Structure formats: C-alpha cells, structure tokens
Amino acid sequence: MAAIGLFIGLLCTVGQPILVAEPTRIACVGDSITFGAAIKDRTANCYPAQLGRMLGEGAEVRNFGVNGATLLRKGDKPYWRQGAYRNALGFKPNVVVIKLGTNDSKPQNWKHKAEYVADYVALVRSFQKLESKPMVWVCYPAPAYPGRWGITDKVMKEEVVPLIDKVSKEAGVRIIDLYAALSNKKAMFPDRVHPNAAGAKVMATTIHGAIGKSLPKAAKK
C-alpha cells in the first residue's frame, strides 16, 4: 500500500511546472586574443574556456572571438560584419565581456580613431537592448611586446585605453583591466601580441575576479 501511495503521489506531480535553474549565459566578444589564436589546443585553453571551468556548471561561457576583428566600423575587419556578432546577439547573454581594440591600433584602422568611442558605445548598446538585459563589461586591451603586424603597444596604452574610459562613462559599463593584469609578462606573449595558454589563464582569472560576485541570479524556466 505504501508503494501505491508513493506512486499516486508521483502521479500528482505530473503536469506541475518544475523550476529548473538555467546557467548564466556569458558571451566573450573579441578578436584573436579572445578566439585563442596561437594557443595550443585552443578550444580547451583560450580564456573563455578557462573562464568557463572557473565558473563551473552555473555558467555557460561561449567564445565569440574573431581573428583580426576591429571595433571600428571602418576598420579592415569590423566585428559588426562578422557572423560571430550575430551569433553573440542570438545567444541572448546575461553577461557580455568585450575585448576589442588591439587590431584597431593598426595605422590603417586607427586613422578612424575619432569614431572609436561612438562605435564602441553603439556596440555596447546593441547588447544592452537585448531582451536578456545583459550586464556588459569592457576590457582594456592586452599589452603588446612591443607589437607586430602594425599593432603598437604605444597606441593601445596611450590612446585606446583613455578612449575606453570614455566609453565606460558614456555607456555606463565597468572596465576590466587586462592591460595591467598582463603587464610585465612578456614571456606569455611568444609572438609579441597573442598570449599563450598561461596568459589566457591570467585573463580568465582577472575576468572571473571582476564578474564573479556580480553575476545575475540564474534564470528560471
């Protein structure tokens, strides 16, 4: 009889809504440094993958990095035109971490620097207006040692970083300082621009420290 009663009790729950916590969706938007270019076993060792392991099962972290992408719409490879951008929007993230600016420092792109702040604010707002209302973070670019492919650390440090400060104020978003976190770590940049797996771990740890305590509560369905 006890078994029958238990069976009936279980039947009574059928059709009742069960609240299941969804993982917090985190979109990592960026260029080749986010993508994990030049990192051995990139899919496991890029910073988004390492961040995902740090956050555990409560988060779903996806990599929307694009090699060579620029923040500038008039850059030689605007992130705006990439499928990764559309996919990031479609992911309906709860959190967005943007790291763009390294490729913008190239001369052919930086000649449009007067449009950098407006373009960055527009990118941020394109995520902020999503139904998921994500919390958006912007990152200072990683340092270069001293640079390559037209990328210059001087431009990133002296020009890009101050403009990101303006973006932060205008768009109302917080900054993650990857420049400071990766400074004086030349050995982690074998090609002088892209961090290796150890450098990606520093990025993941820094981002985890910034966003970990402010992650939104898991959504319910």
Image (cartoon, rainbow, N blue to C red):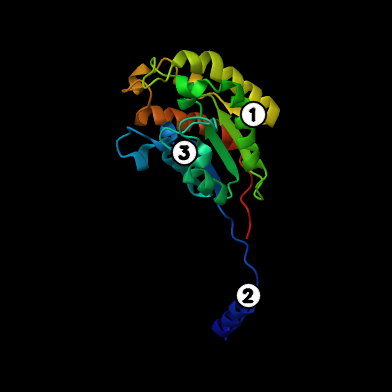
Camera-nearest label, 2 or 3: 3
Residue 118: image quadrant is: top right
At x 63%, y 75%, the residue is 13
Report helix, strand or loop for mark 3. Answer: helix
At label 1, which amino acid type do we have? Answer: Ala
At x 35%, y 28%, the residue is 196
Q: Which residue is mark 3?
A: 51
Report helix, strand or loop for mark 2. Answer: helix
Judge left or right: residue 25 versus residue 51.
Answer: right
Label located before the other in sequence (2 or 3):
2
| Label 3 crowd (10 A; few <14 / some 14-19 / many >=20) | many
Q: Which residue is mark 1?
A: 118
At label 3, which amino acid type do we have? Answer: Leu
Report helix, strand or loop for mark 1. Answer: helix
Query: Looking at this view, is 46 or 166 the one in front?
Result: 166
Residue 146: image quadrant is: top left
Label located before the other in sequence (3 or 1):
3
Q: Which residue is mark 2?
A: 13
24 in relation to 139, above or below: below
Camera-nearest label, 2 or 1: 1
Q: CA distance from mark 2 to mark 3?
A: 38 Å
Residue 72 on image: x %, y %: 54, 30
Can residue 142 be seen from the camera position used here?
no
Q: CA distance from mark 2 to mark 1?
A: 53 Å
